[in-house]
Image (cartoon, grey):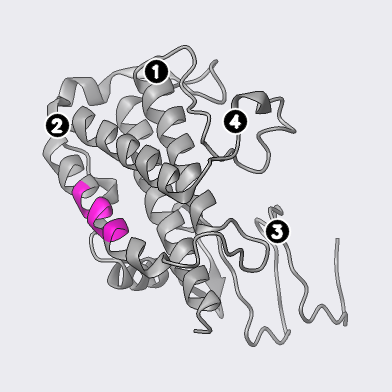
C-alpha cells in the first residue's frame, strides 16, 4: 500500500501493524510515536537508528528503569525495588485524577488494575502454575475478549481504595517471590501463558512483568501530565 501526496495530518493509528513502513519526503513535524516494543527493534530517522537514543532518554527520565533487564536474582530484586519506588512516587500525583481518561486511554485506576492482571498472568499463572490465576479486579488488555478470554471473571471495583489494596498485595507477591528465587529457578521453563505450545524461561516471565510495570508507569505519568494541562 502506498500513500503519495496525501494529507494525513492529525491521523491516529492505534494497535496497528506498521513494521517496515517507509515515510519519505514528508512533513512529520509533531508526529508522536508510542511503541512499547521499540527497544526490541530499530527505528530509522534520517538514516539514524534512534532506538538507543530513545531508550537512554527514557531511562534518564525514569531512574531505575535501566535495571529491568537484570538476569540475576539479586539484580531482579533491585529492579523490582526500583519500580516499586517509582510507582510510590507517582501515586500521590494521581490524587483526584484516578478516574480521568485522557485521549481514550485507561484511567490511572484501570492502569493499576491492568498491572494486577499482568502479575496474575506472568507470575501466578505462568511461573507458579495456578489453574485460575486471575483476580476479579484485573483490567484485561484490549484484545482479551476478542481472543476468546473469559470476561465473566472480572468486575468493577467498589472504590479506588480497593484497587490500591489489591495492587499492593500483588506487588508484595512479586517481591516475596523474588526474595527467594534462585539462578536455577530463573532458568526453568514454563508454557507461554498465551501460547502454551511454546515454552519460555521464568526469567522471561519476570522481564515481561518489569516491562509492563515501566511501560504503564510511563503512560500514567504522560496522561497525568496531560490531565493537569502539562
Note whether residue 210 is visible. yes
Q: Specify the farthest residue to the front.
A: 158
| Label 1 CA crowd tier, 10 Å (few <14, some 14–19, many 20+) | some
Magenta region includes residue 86: yes
What residue appears at the point 18 percent right and 20 percent down from the top-left corner?
A: 184
Q: 181 or 149: nearer the eye?
A: 149
Q: Is residue 65 visible?
A: no
Picture quadrant of residue 143: top right
Question: Which contiguous range is marked in magenta?
Answer: 81-88
Element assignment for label 4: loop
> Viewer-nearest of labels 2 and 4?
4
The part of the image, by quadrant, that contains residue 152 is top right
134, above or below 158, in the image = above
**Percent position (x, y) of residue 31?**
64, 79
The span from disc 3 to disc 4 (Cα, nearest Å) is: 24 Å
Q: Residues within 10 Å of mark 2 (few under 14, many from 20)?
A: few
Say which element carries label 2: helix
Residue pointed to by mark 1: 190
Residue drawn at the location 32% of the way across and 26% of the way down: 202
Return the disc, 1 or 2, that comes first in the chain's sequence. 2
The residue to which callout 2 is attached is 179
Mark on residue 153? none
The residue to which callout 3 is attached is 14
Question: What residue is drawn where x is 53% and y is 40%?
Answer: 157
For marks 1 and 3, the one nearer the N-term is: 3
What residue is pinned by disc 4? 154
Q: Nearer the viewer, residue 25 or 229?
A: 229
Q: Nearer the viewer, residue 137 or 202?
A: 137
| Percent position of residue 4, x then y | 87, 77
Disc 2 to disc 3, how far (Cα)?
38 Å
Disc 3 element? loop
Amino acid at each position: 500500500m502506498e500513500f503519495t501526496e496525501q494529507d494525513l495530518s492529525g491521523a491516529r493509528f492505534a494497535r496497528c501493524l506498521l513494521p517496515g513502513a517507509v515515510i519519505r519526503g514528508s512533513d512529520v513535524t509533531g508526529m508522536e510515536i508510542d511503541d512499547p516494543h521499540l527497544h526490541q527493534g530499530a527505528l530509522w530517522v534520517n538514516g539514524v537508528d534512534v532506538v538507543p537514543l530513545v531508550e537512554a532518554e527514557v531511562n534518564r527520565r525514569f531512574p531505575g528503569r535501566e535495571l529491568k533487564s537484570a538476569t540475576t536474582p539479586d539484580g531482579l530484586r533491585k529492579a523490582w525495588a526500583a519500580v516499586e519506588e517509582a510507582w510510590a512516587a507517582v501515586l500521590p500525583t494521581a490524587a483526584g485524577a484516578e478516574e480521568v481518561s485522557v485521549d481514550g486511554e485507561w484511567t490511572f485506576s484501570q492502569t493499576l488494575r491492568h498491572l494486577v492482571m499482568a502479575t496474575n498472568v506472568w507470575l501466578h499463572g505462568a511461573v507458579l502454575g495456578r489453574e485460575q490465576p486471575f483476580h476479579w479486579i484485573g483490567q484485561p488488555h484490549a484484545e482479551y475478549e476478542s481472543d476468546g478470554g473469559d470476561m465473566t471473571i472480572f468486575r468493577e471495583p467498589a472504590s479506588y481504595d480497593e484497587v490500591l489494596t489489591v495492587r499492593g498485595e500483588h506487588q508484595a507477591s512479586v517481591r516475596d517471590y523474588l526474595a527467594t528465587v534462585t539462578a536455577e529457578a530463573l532458568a526453568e521453563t514454563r508454557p507461554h501463558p498465551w501460547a502454551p505450545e511454546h515454552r519460555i524461561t521464568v526469567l522471561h516471565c519476570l522481564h515481561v512483568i518489569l516491562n509492563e510495570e515501566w511501560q504503564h508507569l510511563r503512560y500514567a505519568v504522560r496522561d497525568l501530565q496531560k490531565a493537569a494541562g502539562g
